[in-house]
Image (tube, rainbow, N blue to C red):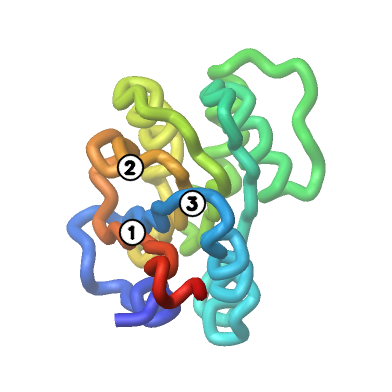
Amino acid sequence: MTIVQLLLDSNIQVENVSIVALVGIGGLGKITLAQLVYNNENVTKHFDFKMWVCVSDIFDVKLIAEKITGSAKGKMPENLLMDKLQEMLSKEIDGKKYLLVLDDVWNENRDEWLKLIDLLMGGSRGSKILVTSHAELFANVTWANSLYFIKGLSKEESW
């Protein structure tokens, strides 16, 4: 099943929001693949709205929630306490089918990941979170519904 087909399938998960992870070492094209999927015409039509957030190595739930809210609203929230930020984010995503790309996630702390995911579970059935990550331990942290390890070329293929 291709990544696009997986994102368009609303019947494969138990939860309303499911997680698809693209994992592999740097330079293999995870972000390029995610961009192609994100910009796919069928994907764009399928979701009520799409968001793209770069996470990188600092996994701060409040900062990521601010970025997600800013991506959803088109304007970054300023100086909000976490409860107000959570309320604002809920207002944007609850009951809507969304696609969120969390790009370049390095977090391997399950508790922090679950705090973030708890904020995102209000989307309607078929909502998806597409994560790109270098960390192979990421699979154990996220409980991704679908996990794709992207491998590089063999030595012979690269020659």
The residue to which callout 3 is attached is 132
Q: Is residue 119 above or below residue 133?
A: above
Mark 2 and mark 3: span between their CA atoms?
11 Å
Residue at left offset 39%, top offset 37%: 117
Residues at discs 2 and 1 in contact (Cβ within 8 Å): yes
Residues at discs 1 and 3 in contact (Cβ within 8 Å): no
Within 10 angstroms of label 3, few (less than 14), some, or many (20 or more) residues? many
Asked if residue 39 lies left or right of residue 87, the reply is: right
Q: Which mark is residue 136?
A: 2
Q: Residue 85: tell me if it is visible.
A: yes
Within 10 angstroms of label 2, few (less than 14), some, or many (20 or more) residues? some
Q: Earlier in the sequence, mark 1 or mark 3?
A: 3
Q: Is residue 60 above or below residue 35?
A: above
Quadrant location, the N terminus? bottom left
Q: Is residue 105 above or below residue 149?
A: above
Q: Amino acid at mark 1?
A: Phe
**Closer to the eye: label 2 or 3:** 2
Residue 42: image x %, image y %? 54, 85
Asked if residue 131 lies left or right of residue 104, the reply is: left
Mark 1 and mark 3: span between their CA atoms?
10 Å
Asked if residue 78 lies left or right of residue 83, the reply is: right
Along the line of sight, the residue nearer the viewer: 142 or 82? 142
The residue to which callout 1 is attached is 149
Along the line of sight, the residue nearer the viewer: 18 or 139? 139
